[in-house]
């Protein structure tokens, strides 16, 4: 099984097999604050912010039963394409 790593901004890459969900932050923040969302899903202590200035995407990953969130300035559609996922 070939490992595929996805560039998510700055000098950061993540293993695509660890990605659970790719979320558009703009859609999330219409209803809730990003901090509240992270707190509610139990990852507020495990957020890695690689967004330089404009937060666009929250990527939730799980590795070794540890849930982490990555905030990036790259759009959710671009991240999905980099993971070879269908984008609708």
Image (cartoon, helix red, strand yellow):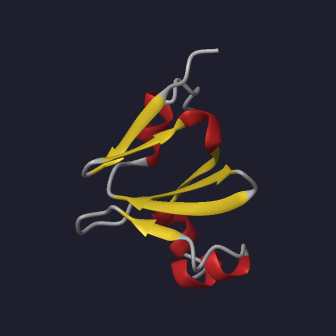
Q: Can residue 85 be seen by looking at this rendering? A: yes
Q: Is residue 79 left or right of residue 2?
A: left
Quarter assignment of residue 3: top right
**Vertical relation: 4 (above or below) 25:** above
| Residue drawn at x 59%, y 62% as measured from the top left | 68
**Vertical relation: 50 (above or below) 21:** below
- In depth, the one of 38 and 32 nearer the eye is 38
- In depth, the one of 29 and 17 nearer the eye is 17
Q: Is residue 18 left or right of residue 70?
A: right
Quarter assignment of residue 55: bottom left
Q: Can residue 33 be seen by looking at this rendering? A: no
| Residue drawn at x 44%, y 66% as measured from the top left | 48
Q: Quadrant of the N terminus?
A: top right
Residue 30 in the image: state x and y as whole percent.
Answer: 53, 75
| Residue drawn at x 64%, y 73% as measured from the top left | 43
- In depth, the one of 27 and 54 nearer the eye is 54
Residue 81 in the image: state x and y as whole percent.
Answer: 46, 29
Q: Quadrant of the C terminus?
A: top right
| Residue drawn at x 53%, y 64% as measured from the top left | 27
**Vertical relation: 65 (above or below) 82:** below
- In depth, the one of 71 and 23 nearer the eye is 71
Residue 15 in the image: state x and y as whole percent.
Answer: 53, 37
Residue 35 in the image: state x and y as whole percent.
Answer: 54, 83
Q: Residue furthest top?
A: 1
């Amino acid at each position: 099984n070939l490992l595929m790593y996805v560039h998510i901004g700055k000098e950061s890459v993540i293993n695509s097999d660890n990605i659970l969900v790719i979320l558009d932050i703009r859609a999330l923040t219409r209803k809730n604050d990003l901090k509240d969302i992270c707190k509610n899903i139990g990852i507020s202590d495990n957020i890695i912010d690689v967004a330089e200035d404009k937060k666009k995407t929250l990527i939730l990953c799980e590795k070794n039963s540890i849930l982490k969130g990555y905030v990036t300035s790259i759009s959710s559609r671009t991240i999905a394409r980099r993971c070879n996922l269908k984008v609708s």
